[in-house]
Image (spheres, rainbow, N blue to C red):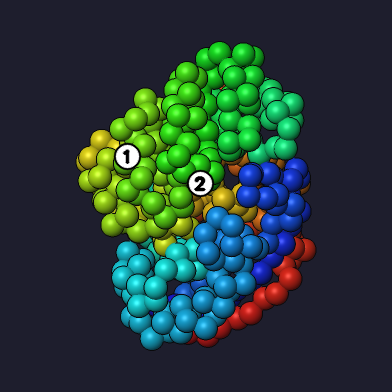
Amino acid sequence: MDLKTVTLYKIAMPLKTPFTTHLGTVKDREGIIVEVMDTEGRKGYGEGVAFSSPWYTEETVETSYHVLKDFLIPILHNADIKHPSEAGRVFDALRRNQMAKAALETALWDLAAKKEDISLSKFIGGKREQILSGVVVGAKTNEEVRKQIENFLERGYQRVKIKIGPENDYELISEIRHFYPDLPIMADANSAYSLDDIDRLKRLDDFGLMMIEQPLEYDDIVDHAKLQKELDTPICLDESIVTFHDARRAADLGSCKVINIKIGRVGGLGTAKKIHDYCLDKGIHVWCGGMLEFGISRAHNIALASLEGFAIPGDISESSRYWEEDITLPEVTVKNGMINVPDKPGIGFEINEKRLGEVTILKENFIL
Ligand code: MG
């Protein structure tokens, strides 16, 4: 790919509203921006979506930065990658660290699409010109949740995802159902339950949820298969699906009817697309999950969600959901619950250099 340099930016930006799950609250979002440049001066961008602490997966911003700087960039230096689809296999020399791998791999996809002068969506075979938008609510009290939902519905979102746990599940969902009898709702448990809670989870079948996401342990696919046999509500797996083979095994076991595909969690766009293709073939529904991300990851998500299998609204919301001012231009906006897929080359968004400068706390340049 005639790569010349890689630049890493460590950034930090306050969220407009703190985001709460049963595992904690995020107030300031740190992240990593990866910029790759080829010998003709073309630039591609990726984003590291690990959080500051390892509550979602084992990775953090610090570990991702370390793995990028000390392992992945040297691997890239020694490899002769002709197409971004080869990067996943090359990076598999390292175990896991999926978000660090995805940060660099997605930058290569952006660069390659720009070189072909087509949008990333077209480059990966996307068919949709607009994608379905959804929003995640993460608030402390039921009243705050309801207020946020009201506000999001006014802004045109068509699907709402709420965070639940044993301390608030039935009351919270019945309250929302009381006010919004027909609203498509997903409930995300982020592993708040065990198989002992099976009766508790069965009660949630009353509400006609679109799905319940990751009710059991973050690395489980066996107990989820047992649970799915007992529940009418479709189970969606998030944390448990870290590789293509995880998706294949979950499909074989009947652990879920839906998979939330996150580019960062599965190590890159190549694997994300492979999981999409497999699920489409096996009749497993997919949607694109969010990571409280900045604009570059959001742009990659939009390209991914333009693939034909993404028929369920994902966690892809407008820039203003999280940020006063994002690092990309133009802002992503939602109209009638839809987001336009850009047709400009690559990710289709410009870098807001001024804003990126303001939020950068560390910048390092590496020559390949
Ligand atoms: Mg989730």
- The image quarter in which residue 137 lies: top right
Q: Nearer the viewer, residue 310 or 80?
A: 310
Mark 2 or 1, which is nearer the eye? Answer: 1
Q: Is residue 42 above or below residue 179?
A: below
1 on left or right of 51: left
Residue at the disc numbered 1:
226
Disc 2 C-beta below 8 A from ligand 1: no
Which residue appears at 41% of the width and 82% of the height? 75
Residue at the disc numbered 2:
191
Q: Is residue 99 above or below residue 26?
A: below
Which residue appears at 63% of the width and 32% of the height? 168
Q: Dot 2: what SS?
A: loop
Q: Quadrant of the N terminus?
A: bottom left
The local crowd at label 1, few if under 14, some if 14 to 19, many if 20 or more residues have their Cα within 10 Å, is some
Distance (Cα) linking label 2 and label 1 = 15 Å
The picture places residue 51, in percent across and down from the top left corner, at 61, 60
